[in-house]
Image (cartoon, helix red, strand yellow):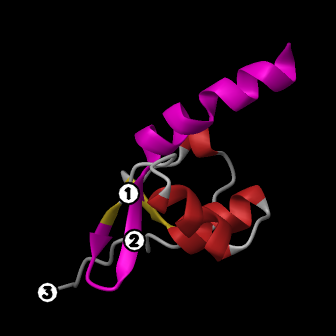
Amino acid sequence: MAIRRHRRIDQPIEDLATHPHLFITVRVLAEYLEVNDRTIIGMIHAQQIPAAKVGREWRLPTDGVRQAFKPLAQKQSA
């Protein structure tokens, strides 16, 4: 019997809008935005980005991250 392997949640993001996972890690979002992990964690603590702590790590819902950064994307395109 073959073991099904799921794609890792910490794979790099090419496009957040089409990312296939429901959740991403702090590291993945930080690399995508080209900021430090601590910047993302600070945004989580300031409740600017929705997140849930699973064990020792934060998980961020991709839909929530898109919604959190939507106003910034709109300002830049205007």
**Does the magenta-highlighted stretch encompass residue 61?**
yes
Say the numbered circle drawn on residue 58.
2
Q: Is residue 78 left or right of residue 2?
A: right
Above-or-below relation of 46 to 42: above
**Residue at x 39% of width, y 57% of height:** 23
Disc 2 vs disc 1: Cβ atoms closer than 8 Å? yes
- How far is disc 2 from disc 3 in space, using C-alphas? 33 Å
Q: Amino acid at mark 2?
A: Trp
Give x and y (percent) for residue 18.
55, 40
- Residue 37's quadrant in the figure? bottom right
Q: CA distance from mark 1 to mark 3?
A: 36 Å
In the rendered view, does 5 fall on the left or right side of 12?
A: left
Residue that badge 3 annotates? 1
Range covered by the magenta-colored residues = 53-78
Taking the spot 57% from the left edge, 64% from the top edge, the residue there is 42
**Image coords of residue 15 (percent x, y):** 66, 45
Q: Earlier in the sequence, mark 1 or mark 3?
A: 3
Q: Is residue 76 left or right of residue 39?
A: right
In the rendered image, which residue does mark 1 sit on? 51
Is residue 6 visible from the viewing direction of this image?
Answer: yes
- Binning the other alpha carbons within 10 Å of mark 1 as few (below 14), some (14 to 19) or many (20 upward) gives many
In front of the other: 76 or 48:
48
* Quarter of the image that includes the C terminus: top right
Q: Between tags 1 and 3, which lies in front?
A: 1
Q: Give the residue at x 56% y 56%.
A: 43
Dominant SS in magenta: helix
Name the image quarter holding the N terminus: bottom left
Label 2 – label 1 distance at C-alpha: 6 Å
Q: Tag on residue 20?
A: none
